[in-house]
Amino acid sequence: MPRTGGVYSPPAGTKGVPNTTIQSVPYNALIDDLTADANAARPITAGGTGATSASAARTALGAQTASAALSSIAGLATGADKTIYTTAADAYATTALTPFGRSLIDDADAATARSTLGLVIGTNVQAFDAGLQSIAGLTTAADRMIYTTAADTYAVAPLTAFARTLLDDADAATARSTLGLAIGTNVQAYDTGLAAIAALPVTNGNFIVGNGTTWVAESGATARASMGAASTATTMTAGNGLTGGGDLSVSRTLTLGTPSSITNDTTNSVTSTSHTHALGFTAAEVYTGTTQDATSLPIGHVLSASTNTWINRNQSVGIYIYTGQAMSYVTQYYSGLGAQLAGTWRARGVVAGNDQIQLFQRTA
């Protein structure tokens, strides 16, 4: 298009010259150009809109787009002290707007609006409170009370006639009377000792022990110490004459050591594993030897011996082996004295029918 800035200019070489033949090529180019220009959108500078549709033409000209809302408003019948408002999408109506209403909607903020309405929070209107809001939303019925379930959150619960007789009591004594609780009669009077016991842990192996101030729970070594019982680490030592012993962590056995045989020579004595006793009297012993020349016969041994002199009862005398033959013993007053027998020998009587033969017993 040879249109510049909205102004049409014919193509070069299309102007006719007088007394000359019109050339077909430039002429046809001019005709085609005019056809194209006639079918193109007319620019605003040429008196058009530069658009090919009504909406584009309105946009190009800055005209208002068709609107159902504007059509609704255009159809309203207005009057003094009216304002418009929507009744549906793109649908408008009018309502009264009084001078007071205008004095309210021209307020710049909530504080000014409250002043216009004469509302002073905390003076003639209740300040908003979440707790009151929760209470306002409760559904109540007969014999109900409200209680909190969280901060500023309330619910209702039953409140029986009996419960009200308890709630109206003036003091604890009256409340106990209402409940039928007489301290020391049908309920236990408070006792610090019982309270201490009630607070103790119920642990297997614990003992309840008084510590001089209160009751405490103890077990193991602590309880044994409180009761004066020996610690399991205490050692039981076997004394002289006994064996065994050890700590008290297990059962222990003390064993009496086996003593030696009691003879006239034993004394009262104790060793690490045994003991002996002294004989409180002189006991006869039996000689079990087989040597005919033995000189150490046991205390209490009795024998007969020949003597040239009578020896009084219980008188001591020396006894000897007789050298004349292997069967007899003789006293110191006889002939043929061999080896002397050990110990003290005392006369115990005469052998009947035998001349100067007496009985003798070793006594020491």
Image: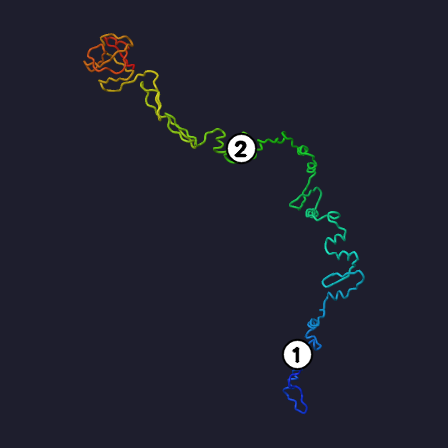
Q: Are marks 2 and 1 in contact (CB under 8 Å)?
A: no
Q: Amino acid at mark 2?
A: Val
**Nearer to me, 120 or 288:** 120
- Where does residue 4 sit, x and y in percent of width and height? 66, 79
> Foreground: 241 or 281?
241
User: On the rendered image, what quadrant is the C terminus found in?
Assistant: top left
Q: Nearer the viewer, residue 123 or 296?
A: 123
Q: Position of residue 361 (x, y in %)?
A: 28, 13
Instruction: Write down the residue under mark 1.
Output: 4
Q: Quadrant of residue 146?
A: top right
Callout 1 amino acid = Thr
Judged left or right of residue 16, residue 357 is left
Which quadrant of the structure image shows residue 255?
Answer: top left
Where does residue 98 sit, x and y in percent of width and height?
Answer: 79, 57
Residue 216 badge = 2
User: Above or below — where is 251 with respect to 22?
Assistant: above
